[in-house]
Protein backbone atom coordinates (compact mmCIF):
# COMPACT_ATOMS: atom_id res chain seq x y z
CA UNK A 1 0.00 0.00 0.00
CA UNK A 2 1.19 3.53 -0.75
CA UNK A 3 2.47 5.26 2.37
CA UNK A 4 4.40 8.45 2.94
CA UNK A 5 5.73 9.70 6.27
CA UNK A 6 5.99 13.44 6.87
CA UNK A 7 7.06 13.68 10.52
CA UNK A 8 9.62 16.52 10.59
CA UNK A 9 8.03 19.87 11.33
CA UNK A 10 8.79 23.52 10.78
CA UNK A 11 10.78 24.72 13.78
CA UNK A 12 12.61 21.41 14.28
CA UNK A 13 16.40 21.27 14.08
CA UNK A 14 17.19 19.73 10.70
CA UNK A 15 18.94 16.37 10.94
CA UNK A 16 22.56 16.68 9.89
CA UNK A 17 24.03 14.45 7.20
CA UNK A 18 27.11 13.72 5.17
CA UNK A 19 26.52 12.63 1.57
CA UNK A 20 28.71 12.49 -1.52
CA UNK A 21 27.94 14.87 -4.34
CA UNK A 22 28.18 13.92 -8.01
CA UNK A 23 31.97 14.43 -8.10
CA UNK A 24 32.63 12.50 -4.89
CA UNK A 25 33.01 15.39 -2.43
CA UNK A 26 31.47 15.07 1.02
CA UNK A 27 28.69 17.56 1.74
CA UNK A 28 27.47 18.13 5.29
CA UNK A 29 24.47 20.21 6.23
CA UNK A 30 26.40 21.43 9.27
CA UNK A 31 28.98 23.04 6.93
CA UNK A 32 26.35 25.69 6.12
CA UNK A 33 25.40 26.48 9.72
CA UNK A 34 25.99 30.12 10.57
CA UNK A 35 26.88 30.91 6.94
CA UNK A 36 23.84 30.60 4.69
CA UNK A 37 20.41 29.05 4.32
CA UNK A 38 19.97 25.76 2.49
CA UNK A 39 17.18 24.53 0.28
CA UNK A 40 17.05 20.74 0.38
CA UNK A 41 15.22 19.56 -2.71
CA UNK A 42 14.44 15.84 -2.59
CA UNK A 43 13.48 14.27 -5.91
CA UNK A 44 12.60 10.82 -7.22
CA UNK A 45 15.50 10.44 -9.63
CA UNK A 46 16.62 11.32 -13.12
CA UNK A 47 14.36 8.78 -14.82
CA UNK A 48 11.24 10.47 -13.43
CA UNK A 49 9.91 13.17 -15.80
CA UNK A 50 8.57 15.22 -12.90
CA UNK A 51 11.96 15.16 -11.21
CA UNK A 52 13.74 16.50 -14.27
CA UNK A 53 11.07 19.19 -14.57
CA UNK A 54 11.67 20.10 -10.91
CA UNK A 55 15.44 20.24 -11.34
CA UNK A 56 15.05 22.43 -14.43
CA UNK A 57 12.78 24.83 -12.53
CA UNK A 58 15.36 25.09 -9.75
CA UNK A 59 18.06 25.73 -12.36
CA UNK A 60 16.00 28.53 -13.89
CA UNK A 61 15.47 30.20 -10.48
CA UNK A 62 18.89 29.40 -9.06
CA UNK A 63 20.36 32.91 -9.31
CA UNK A 64 17.39 34.41 -7.51
CA UNK A 65 17.61 31.74 -4.78
CA UNK A 66 21.38 32.30 -4.41
CA UNK A 67 20.72 36.03 -4.24
CA UNK A 68 18.72 35.32 -1.08
CA UNK A 69 21.83 33.83 0.58
CA UNK A 70 20.63 30.28 0.04
CA UNK A 71 22.39 27.28 -1.47
CA UNK A 72 20.51 24.43 -3.16
CA UNK A 73 21.22 20.76 -2.52
CA UNK A 74 19.20 18.29 -4.61
CA UNK A 75 19.00 14.78 -3.18
CA UNK A 76 17.89 11.49 -4.71
CA UNK A 77 18.69 7.81 -4.44
CA UNK A 78 20.47 7.91 -7.82
CA UNK A 79 24.11 6.82 -7.94
CA UNK A 80 26.92 9.39 -8.02
CA UNK A 81 27.52 8.63 -11.70
CA UNK A 82 23.86 9.12 -12.55
CA UNK A 83 23.87 12.39 -10.56
CA UNK A 84 26.93 13.54 -12.53
CA UNK A 85 25.20 12.67 -15.81
CA UNK A 86 22.00 14.44 -14.72
CA UNK A 87 23.87 17.57 -13.68
CA UNK A 88 25.59 17.76 -17.05
CA UNK A 89 22.57 16.87 -19.14
CA UNK A 90 20.41 19.59 -17.57
CA UNK A 91 23.21 22.15 -16.93
CA UNK A 92 22.46 22.22 -13.21
CA UNK A 93 24.48 24.83 -11.28
CA UNK A 94 23.80 23.31 -7.86
CA UNK A 95 25.06 20.14 -6.23
CA UNK A 96 23.29 16.82 -6.59
CA UNK A 97 23.72 14.47 -3.65
CA UNK A 98 23.51 10.71 -3.84
CA UNK A 99 21.62 8.79 -1.13
CA UNK A 100 21.58 5.29 -2.68
CA UNK A 101 20.36 3.48 0.44
CA UNK A 102 17.75 6.21 1.13
CA UNK A 103 19.04 6.70 4.68
CA UNK A 104 18.73 10.49 4.58
CA UNK A 105 15.51 10.30 2.61
CA UNK A 106 14.07 8.15 5.39
CA UNK A 107 15.51 10.42 8.09
CA UNK A 108 13.70 13.39 6.56
CA UNK A 109 10.61 11.18 6.28
CA UNK A 110 10.07 11.71 2.58
CA UNK A 111 10.60 8.06 1.61
CA UNK A 112 7.92 6.65 -0.66
CA UNK A 113 7.66 2.95 0.10
CA UNK A 114 5.79 2.34 -3.15
CA UNK A 115 8.55 3.63 -5.46
CA UNK A 116 11.37 2.98 -2.96
CA UNK A 117 12.80 6.47 -3.37
CA UNK A 118 12.15 10.07 -2.32
CA UNK A 119 9.03 11.99 -3.10
CA UNK A 120 9.35 15.53 -4.40
CA UNK A 121 9.79 17.75 -1.39
CA UNK A 122 11.52 20.90 -0.23
CA UNK A 123 12.94 21.97 3.11
CA UNK A 124 14.33 25.42 3.81
CA UNK A 125 16.94 25.20 6.55
CA UNK A 126 17.98 28.55 8.02
CA UNK A 127 21.49 29.52 9.13
CA UNK A 128 20.80 28.28 12.65
CA UNK A 129 19.92 24.80 11.36
CA UNK A 130 16.13 25.03 11.85
CA UNK A 131 13.55 23.93 9.35
CA UNK A 132 11.72 27.11 8.34
CA UNK A 133 9.62 25.73 5.49
CA UNK A 134 8.55 22.26 4.42
CA UNK A 135 6.64 21.01 1.41
CA UNK A 136 6.08 17.31 0.76
CA UNK A 137 4.16 16.40 -2.39
CA UNK A 138 1.33 13.92 -2.32
CA UNK A 139 1.88 12.57 -5.84
CA UNK A 140 4.54 12.87 -8.57
CA UNK A 141 3.06 15.78 -10.55
CA UNK A 142 2.65 17.79 -7.34
CA UNK A 143 5.89 19.78 -7.16
CA UNK A 144 7.06 22.41 -4.66
CA UNK A 145 6.63 25.90 -6.11
CA UNK A 146 9.79 27.99 -6.54
CA UNK A 147 7.71 31.16 -6.21
CA UNK A 148 6.55 30.08 -2.75
CA UNK A 149 10.07 29.00 -1.81
CA UNK A 150 11.48 32.37 -2.92
CA UNK A 151 8.78 34.15 -0.92
CA UNK A 152 9.66 32.08 2.15
CA UNK A 153 13.35 32.90 1.70
CA UNK A 154 12.57 36.61 1.49
CA UNK A 155 10.69 36.32 4.79
CA UNK A 156 13.81 34.94 6.51
CA UNK A 157 15.62 38.25 6.16
Image (spheres, rainbow, N blue to C red):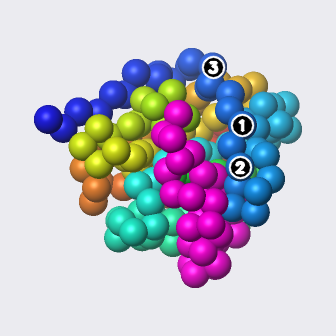
Where does the image place residue 52, in percent across and percent down from the top left? 44, 69
Q: Residue at x 34, y 44 (%)?
A: 116
> Does the CB distance between marks 3 and 2 fall below 8 Å?
no
Q: Which of pointers 3 and 2 lies earlier in the amino acid sequence?
A: 3
Position of residue 35 relative to residue 63, above or below, is above
Residue of label 1: 18
Residue 66 visible within the image: no
In the rendered structure, which segment of residues is drawn in magenta? 77-103
Is 63 in front, or is 154?
63
Q: Image check: 108 left or right of 98?
A: left
Q: Which of pointers 1 and 3 lies earlier in the amino acid sequence?
A: 3
Q: Nearer the viewer, mark 3 or mark 2?
A: 2
Q: How far, Cα to Cα, is label 1 from label 2?
A: 7 Å
The crowding category of the residue bearing disc 3, from other C-alpha atoms within 10 Å (few below 14, some 14 to 19, many at least 20), is some
SS for callout 2:
strand
Marking on residue 20: 2
The crowding category of the residue bearing disc 2, from other C-alpha atoms within 10 Å (few below 14, some 14 to 19, many at least 20), is some
Q: Image check: 148 left or right of 26?
A: left
SS for callout 3:
loop
SS for callout 1:
strand
For residue 130, what is the image quadrant? top right
Magenta-drawn stretch contains 157:
no
Q: Residue at x 76, y 56 (%)?
A: 24
Q: Residue furthest left?
A: 1
Is 24 in front, or is 37?
24
Q: Residue at x 51, y 57 (%)?
A: 78
Residue 21 visible within the image: yes
Q: Residue at x 63, y 19 (%)?
A: 13
Where does the image place residue 84, in percent across and percent down from the top left? 65, 69
Residue of label 3: 13
Amino acid sequence: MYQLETGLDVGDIAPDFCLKDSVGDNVRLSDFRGKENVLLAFYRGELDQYSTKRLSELRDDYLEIRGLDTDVLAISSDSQQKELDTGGRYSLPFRLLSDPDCALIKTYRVYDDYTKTATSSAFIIDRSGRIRYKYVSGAPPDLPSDMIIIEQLRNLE
